[in-house]
Amino acid sequence: AQINSLRRMADRWTESGGTPLQSWERDASAVSSDFPAYRAVSWVDANLRTRWIWPQTGNEHAVAFDHGRHPLRAQAIRQARDSFTYAIAAPLVSPVERPALAVYATVLSSGSFDGFIVGELSLQRLFEIIDNRLNISSRYVLRARILNTLGATAEERELLVFTSPETEMTD
């Protein structure tokens, strides 16, 4: 359902040949509010650079980011562009942010490739939401690890992205 909201944004862009910035920001804000695991929603242009991002605060470093230079992002970009649908890049690891995944939904303008609507999700926040909705940590300890094939060391290859709060279990 959360990927579908990005696809709907991409579909509106494609149907209208683009989206005015004010309307796009309203849509991006709604997507972020509906699913708080999104740490950013952006429009990446046909040159694979971030042009618009929501929220702007806290994401200033991402403006003009070149998505084509990151191997996992580039692979997802090719898949999404070739299929005219969406693809996921994961895990995205950064020295300054917790691991994430990015969903790339293709947009067209007048039948030509016009970039992507991209939703970047915090994996920690995603597992927090799952844990809260299913009330897992009241019964179990949940730990989520992901494989980072680009990691140089064993520690970099196996990333702990979430550990539920340890609570006292009662019978």
Image (cartoon, rainbow, N blue to C red):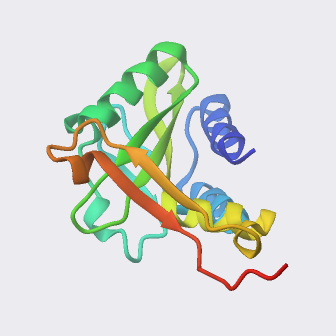
Query: Picture coordinates of residue 165 (x, y %)?
Result: 59, 79
Quadrant of the rendered image containing residue 133 = bottom right
Q: Residue lying at the far left in this picture: please name it.
A: 152
Quadrant of the rendered image containing residue 110 = top right
Pick the residue in front: 31 or 88: 88
Q: Residue lying at the far top in this picture: please name it.
A: 82
Query: Picture coordinates of residue 124 (x, y %)?
Result: 50, 64
Query: Picture coordinates of residue 97 (x, y %)?
Result: 32, 66
Pick the residue in front: 62 or 143: 143
Q: Residue at x 34, y 26 (%)?
A: 75
Q: Is residue 45 above or below residue 169?
A: above
Question: Visible in this render: residue 42?
Answer: no
Q: Which quadrant would the N terminus be assigned to in this image?
A: top right
Q: Residue lying at the far bottom in this picture: please name it.
A: 168
Q: Which quadrant would the C terminus be assigned to in this image?
A: bottom right
Does 47 sit left or right of 152 as displayed? right
Q: Residue at x 24, y 33 (%)?
A: 71
Q: Is residue 80 above or below residue 145?
A: above
Query: Picture coordinates of residue 48 (x, y %)?
Result: 31, 36
Q: Residue at x 50, y 64 (%)?
A: 162
Does 57 sit left or right of 27 as displayed? left
Q: Is residue 148 above or below residue 140?
A: above
Number of marks present in the image shown: 0
Does 41 sit left or right of 160 as displayed? right
Question: Visible in this render: residue 89?
Answer: yes
Q: Residue at x 52, y 56 (%)?
A: 144
Q: Residue lying at the far front in this picture: please name it.
A: 171
